[in-house]
Image (cartoon, rainbow, N blue to C red):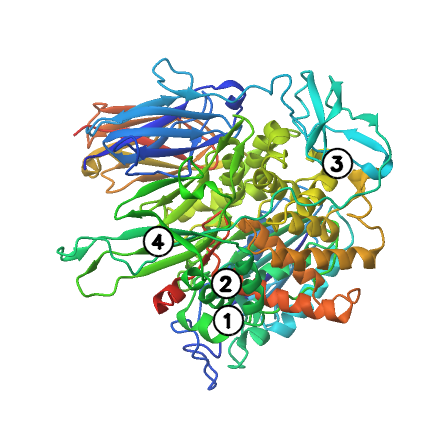
Amino acid sequence: MHVLLVAVGDYPHLEGGSSTERFNGLRGVGQLSSPPVSARVMVEWLRNDFVPYQGKLASVEVLCSGTESFVDDDGIKVVVERATLPQLRAAVARWHARGNVSEDDTLVFMFCGHGVASGAISSLLLEEFGDNSLDPFSTGAVAADDFITGMRSCKALNQLFLLDACRYIPIDYQDEFGESTGVPLVKGVAHSNLGRSRQVCIWASKLGNSAYGRPGYPTIFTDALLASMRGASARQDEATDAWVVQGTALAEGINEFVKRSEAANKQFATPGMMTEGFPLHVLAGPPIIPVNVVCKPANRYGTVDLRCGPGDYTASGLLGPWHLELAHGSYSMTAHPMGKEEVIATRLCIASPPGTLVLMQVGE
Amino acid sequence: MTSATVEFKVSAYGRSAAKGLFGVLELERIADTEVFERTVVRNVRVPVGVSIQAEPVHIGAGKYLGKLRLPTGEHISELVEIAPVQELQRVVLGKSAARKKSTARAAPPKSGVSPLTESRAVNQGKLVLGDFSSKSWSSERELSLYDVSKSLPMPRTAITSDIHLRSEVAVPPAPFVDISPKQVGGGLIAYLDSRKQRAGADSEIKAASVEVLAFAGSSSHLHHRLRQQSEGLINPVTQLINQVGLQESGQHLELVASSSKSARLRINAAGDVFEQSSSYLVLSRTSAHSEGQQPALRASLMRVPGPWFDQRRRKNSGFFLDVGRVASASSPWRLSVDDPAVQSVIDFTQQKDLNGALVVLEMSLELLMMKVENPYAAAAAGYVLMLTPPSRTPLGWFNWIGNLGSWFDELPDGLIQHATLLLQRSWEDQGAELNQPYFPIDERERTQLAADLLLRSIERGLPLYRSGLTLLASNLFILDGSPLLPPEVGRAVARARGYVNGLRRLVDTTQAFTTIDISSLAEMGST
């Protein structure tokens, strides 16, 4: 498996950027602090927690425009290349070549940064976006769909694209720069992989929507992605009985955690294509499932205690849903008047992927 | 309206009880028998099976028609009354005693009804009988063979009792014939003049309104101008629409519908103007607005299928156009076909759920693929097959796709799918059965044929399904700059790529049928 991570936090030509040459075509689009952090936590997760279903993790390459530090396997600090178009072209060429050896190989590409969309066309913005204000998409953007189509001809049939970027349409964009879509990075050639290729593409947001980050922390998508890797995106493998994260289950699992975040109801991870998918990551133990306990009616929040067993989980006087993460299995939930033992509601539930919702009817 | 929380659960239902299957639930508030004022909860994925947790849905109290479409194509509908109480209510759909109405999956075709119309490799003097249906369905049935050039059943029939295997029946050798189209594109364009405000003149706030006007006429003008006007332009459809609509002379104009509230139009039903084959709808919707204020406006050009034949129910069916209050505020209309199996395939495709689409397809393939009777359903099946692993695709489907493109002049989708097979699929699983004119061995010949198919598909107008626009773009990307194309064809491909990207910028990505946003034009008041 070969991973290429691209994180763009610095956009010198956009709002708040370091360059004096300012691109004004995208209003309100400026500097980001969360993509470099996302790249770092992804590297840490790959290094420490990732168990590939097939083969081994053979390479991780990072391009990052930002101040984040990265270390190699020996803990020595390394300088990574910036996420500019020339660097990305070269990195994609290397990554493509590594994957162009065996059909059984797996390629993972993750982009974290700004994105724009126009209708069904999405573009990913690189560091130097806006350096040529007459043709910004030709010098600093990736045409996402063409890139993925181009990659379909690569020998490695398992391909995962994680695209953590906005897909909304800035007003000025379509009028002024509508002809451009970005650089495809890989030339389109005839191939015979459609139907065989198990390309999975997960966008952090729906078309027309934004993706969110928290200053100084990983993006909502990255956080949710890594949380879902613990079980929400896992399915039991029929052949081995093990719990395995499936590419086609990623969006559902990610959304279970996004809807617990600040971006709830604003950001929805969305598959970019219809695909058979492939198994990605083997869980070391039972899957950990997000379980949300909701009290009805809502005005009883703050007046009840909630308990869950086995495990003796308790919550008292919560003002909103109770978010638990439980190992796969059966549980009993009870509701009690706050500080009392009297049981006013009981529910049995099975915590199973992608997530479980438990409604507790706790009276008027 | 009192809000209520209801748990919907589907009891074990035949083959659908398999673990992990989900159905799609729609709830329609019932106002009267003709027009539903709809409160729709769309794409609620309801777990199917006894061991899976029920799905809670928050809806207002009242009477609903709950319609559940299972991945297998089964269609359950049930009247549901939701009480205006706070307590959690439970509804079990499926094999419950309380079920008032349910339509189970249709039985396999009866003897005498042709379940298979397609499969021939005339060049080799053989007729290949491949049953395209589920590999696990092994009941004996009669296969009637069609002479595709005449669209008539051939006199001889063959019986197969094992659909895992192919049967080969010798037929007299015949040269390959480029078969003329069986259905010529019709011309029906509905046009909605959003400028007509039908709300009461005395009211201070004019209600949101929707009108649909239709006029009959050849759609070839549309296709032609689409091409001519669009090349090299950023926003081709805007230019296109200037050329159609009411400016066409001699068109017959007819008001189809006007509504200031949510409505469901049944199209292709007997007696309405849509009974002819149709190509495009132009729809628009004005928002609620104050007197003297310009209403916000949303307008779309939508490619719609022609007369719809439901093979399973063996009857002419139609499609529904829901306008007004539907799931997404950004999409004020939604087209759906009144054909449960096909709509299931369309829905799963829309949700990017290949396994769900394949479950339906594998159980209904022989029906979906009867393209002589319904090429639009066949095209929907084709898009799923494009992405299906070779181990799960039916026998002989490459030639079948070739025919789909060749026979139906009005439909670009078959040509796009054919080009996709030439440029992006492996042919290994097709063996020696490939029809050579459709699938040339020589790489240069194959590339040039693909370019020709794609350019011809553009001449035919918008693909019926949005999936077609995506494949069209990916194929043109592959061809752009190919050294195997003559220079003039290469230039045409580059122009076509710009044109298709222009369309993709305007496409409504929430619709399964290709729908282009033309709001900016409508605001210009070109009509």
Disc 3 marks which amino acid? Gly
Q: Using the numbered discs, state the Cα–Cα distance from disc 1 to disc 3 in whole angstroms.
A: 42 Å
Chain to which mark 2 belongs: B
Disc 1 marks which amino acid? Gly
Q: Position of residue A10 (x, y in %)?
A: 49, 73
Q: Do badges 1 and 2 share one subunit?
A: no
Residue linked to disc 1: A178
Chain to which mark 1 belongs: A
Q: Using the numbered discs, state the Cα–Cα distance from disc 4 to disc 1 in whole angstroms.
A: 32 Å
Residue linked to disc 2: B505
Q: Is residue B424 visible?
A: yes
| Left or right relative to B143: residue A127 | left
Chain to which mark 4 belongs: A
Of residue A28 and residue A283, the one placed in the foreground of this image is: A28
Residue linked to disc 3: B396
Mark closer to the observer (1, 3): 3
* Mark positioned earlier in the residue sequence (2 or 3): 3
Callout 1 touching callout 2 (CB < 8 Å): yes
Which residue extends farthest top?
Answer: B97
Residue linked to disc 4: A262
Q: Position of residue B523 (x, y in %)?
A: 35, 66
Mark 3: give few (<14), some (14-19) or many (20+) Cα within 10 Å. many
Of residue A32 and residue A153, the one placed in the foreground of this image is: A153
Mark 2: give few (<14), some (14-19) or many (20+) Cα within 10 Å. many
Disc 2 marks which amino acid? Arg
- For label 4, the SS is loop
Compared with A91, B180 (above or below) is: above
